[in-house]
């Protein structure tokens, strides 16, 4: 006797779609983040910025300490030869004195040297370096094929390449921002969870101290504290002091936000059930409260990094952040302190573009993460 099945035949989607378990929280957030083009754009830019700072020696086309003609204008990439014909290999034309004289100053007119083009390429040989201080090399991501320096963003008053210095400066600026945000996150999250969970007298004393820290005018205090270090202090000491000062004044706001989240989570049923069965305070904080606070902390971190980058750039512009021989975006902006320099040599403002891209990248990533995490 034949047996017939009464169940409908499987649909095509059911044949193709594999059976899997429940989707994890991380996978769910990642799926929602991929739908946000601003969040993904910010993530890509953040990854590129971190790779650029990590491999600065390889990415920078010129040695940032090498000197050339001061305030040399940017060399424009061209796809035409001296006769105006289109060529596939890009090139730049170095500036040289021509036979013509300026009718006012009677000085030789400087113009492109079309007779000696410098061909450009990728993975070219250039100035030697030690990657991570250990691996010797002389290959650069891009530059001239003959190894001669090319200044895509011009030079500063000492003849140093602006683009290479900006690439190297990303290492210090991002290191300061990431270190400060890491310290602020650890201290602020710990203090906020402890204060919100235990409450009572401990919470009252902690919050009065937090309010005291928040009451300080931060910018004047930054300038006052950083000016206490003598100019002759070692660079590492000055840099460590700046990081400590920024961290000491930045953790209070984070702790206040985490405390509010902890107060709400401490009253949820599963936390009260853990208390009823005799779970220790340490287990409740680490196993039940901390994972639920982390979603807010991650978004706050991505939005706090741009603030630290802007603060470091501002303090560096005023001369209170990084001292030579270190390079940072704020230190490079010191050359723009006079209007005459900006008007005559506008390419000196190039580090501002790096700051704006960094701020946009982390803000876009933070907005994307907030949209992906908030519903949960």
Image (spheres, helix red, strand yellow):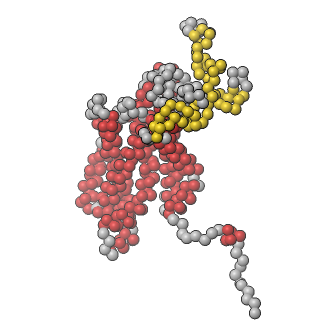
Quarter of image, res 180: top left
Q: From what the image shows, is residue 195 above or below residue 309? A: below
The single residue placed furthest to the right in the displayed view is: 1
Q: From what the image shows, is residue 209 above or below residue 290? A: above
Most foreground residue, 121 or 244: 121
How far from the left and from the top, in percent, is residue 212?
A: 27, 47
Res 14 seen here: yes
How far from the left and from the top, in percent, is residue 31?
A: 56, 59
Q: In this view, does 98 lie to the left or right of 363?
A: right
The single residue placed furthest to the bottom in the displayed view is: 1
The residue at the point 49 percent across, 58 percent down is: 373
The residue at the point 33 percent across, 49 percent down is: 252
The residue at the point 31 percent across, 59 percent down is: 194
Q: Is residue 268 left or right of residue 2?
A: left
How far from the left and from the top, in percent, is residue 87?
A: 71, 29
Q: From what the image shows, is residue 371 above or below residue 13? A: above
Quarter of image, res 123: top right
Q: Is residue 113 left or right of residue 23?
A: right
Q: How many labels, in total?
A: 0
The single residue placed furthest to the front in the displayed view is: 136
Most foreground residue, 246 or 111: 111
Locate the N terminus and report the quarter of the image it occupies: bottom right
Most foreground residue, 299 or 43: 43
Most foreground residue, 259 or 51: 51
How far from the left and from the top, in percent, is residue 304?
A: 42, 46
Res 359 seen here: no
The residue at the point 38 percent across, 30 percent down is: 324
């Amino acid at each position: 006797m034949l047996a017939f099945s009464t169940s409908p035949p499987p649909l095509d989607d059911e044949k193709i779609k594999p059976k899997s378990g429940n989707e994890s929280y991380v996978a769910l957030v990642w799926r929602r983040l991929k739908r946000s083009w601003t969040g993904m754009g910010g993530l890509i830019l953040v990854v590129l910025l971190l790779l650029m700072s990590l491999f600065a020696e390889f990415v920078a086309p010129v040695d940032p300490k090498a000197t050339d003609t001061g305030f040399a204008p940017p060399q424009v990439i061209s796809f035409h030869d001296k006769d105006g014909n289109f060529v596939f290999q890009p090139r730049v034309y170095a500036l040289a004195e021509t036979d013509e004289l300026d009718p006012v100053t009677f000085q030789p007119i400087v113009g492109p040297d079309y007779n000696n083009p410098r061909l450009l390429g990728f993975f070219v040989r250039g100035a030697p370096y030690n990657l991570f201080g250990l691996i010797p090399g002389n290959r650069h991501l891009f530059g001239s094929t003959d190894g001669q320096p090319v200044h895509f963003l011009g030079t500063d008053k000492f003849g140093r390449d602006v683009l290479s210095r900006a690439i190297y400066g990303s290492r210090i600026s991002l290191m300061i921002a990431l270190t400060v945000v890491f310290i602020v996150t650890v201290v602020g999250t710990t203090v906020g969870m402890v204060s919100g969970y235990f409450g009572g007298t401990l919470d009252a004393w902690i919050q009065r101290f937090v309010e005291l820290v928040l009451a300080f005018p931060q910018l004047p205090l930054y300038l006052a504290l950083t000016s206490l270090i003598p100019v002759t202090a070692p660079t590492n000491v000055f840099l460590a002091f700046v990081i400590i000062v920024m961290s000491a004044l930045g953790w209070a706001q984070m702790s206040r936000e985490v405390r509010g989240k902890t107060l709400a989570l401490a009253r949820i049923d599963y936390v009260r059930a853990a208390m009823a069965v005799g779970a220790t305070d340490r287990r409740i904080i680490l196993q039940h409260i901390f994972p639920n606070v982390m979603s807010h902390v991650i978004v706050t971190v991505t939005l706090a990094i741009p603030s630290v980058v802007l603060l470091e750039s501002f303090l560096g512009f005023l001369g209170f952040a990084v001292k030579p021989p270190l390079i940072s975006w704020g230190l490079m902006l010191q050359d723009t302190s006079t209007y005459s320099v900006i008007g005559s040599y506008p390419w000196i403002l190039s580090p501002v573009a790096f700051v704006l891209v960094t701020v946009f990248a982390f803000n876009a990533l933070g907005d994307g993460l907030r949209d992906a995490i908030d519903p949960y």
